[in-house]
Image: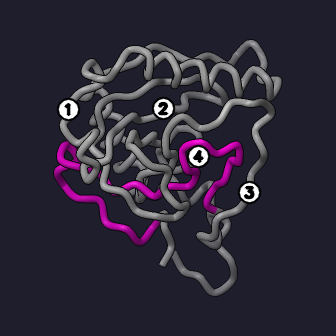
Amino acid sequence: MHPVHDIQVPEDIARFVPTVIEIPRGSHLKYEVDKPTGILRLDRVLYSAVHYPANYGFIPRTHADDGDPLDILVLMQEPVEPLSIVRCRPLGGMRMVDKGIDDKIIGVCVDDPAYAHYSNIEQLPPHLMRELDRFFNDYKTLEGKGPDFQVGALYGVEEAHKVIREALAAYTRGDWKKDYDPPAGRNL
């Protein structure tokens, strides 16, 4: 089973989307699913004392403008083991500009009673949102990202649903194939 291609996304994305966790909350390690194999690989160790403020992963069967599956931060009480599937309700997102547009959907684990009651990003504690913003600004700055990098304003649940639908449509169109070099014998 390939975590990008073989996990179904339900029609009703407002209830939840499956999320494959790559990086547990609190980690200094940046893991990514290797596109050809589906195996987790270490991309890098963060350049600073900052750590991931939420579980971080992607929505399967999506293709974002940066050439990867759509990123999602999952707010919940506990760090989650990499390659676990978490049911996540999207609440909003933040748009970053790095090598083009790089959306980060923000959601909550629907199976965590401490977070399951949130239904939109405005309900989240303001300090938590400042932490997310600060995390991306700090770690990208310390990696030496140039002046073209910026963390944009937060957006709400309707825009998050639109971004997810667009990424699902891009995957369905086959846009991901231009960024994919399958190993011999694997027909996708």
Mark 2 → mark 3, Cα distance in angstroms: 21 Å
Left or right for 142, reference 102: right
Are there few (<14), some (14-19), or many (20+) residues within 10 Å of tag 3? few
Give the mark nearer the N terminus: 1 vs 2: 2
- Dot label at residue 103: 2
Mark 4 → mark 3, Cα distance in angstroms: 18 Å
Which residue is identified by label 1? 119
Give the mark nearer the N terminus: 4 vs 3: 3
Are there few (<14), some (14-19), or many (20+) residues within 10 Å of tag 4? some
Kind of residue indicated by mark 2: Asp
Give the mark nearer the N terminus: 3 vs 1: 3
Which residue is identified by label 3? 42
The reply to whether callout 2 and callout 3 are in contact (CB within 8 Å) is no
At horizontal 18% and vertical 47% (from top left) the residue drawn is 15
Mark yes or no: residue 150 visible. Answer: yes
Instruction: Give the answer, above or below, for where 114 lies relative to 18.
Output: above
Which residue is identified by label 4? 67
Kind of residue indicated by mark 4: Gly
- Residue 115, percent across and down? 28, 39
Magenta segment range? Answer: 5-33
Kind of residue indicated by mark 1: Ser
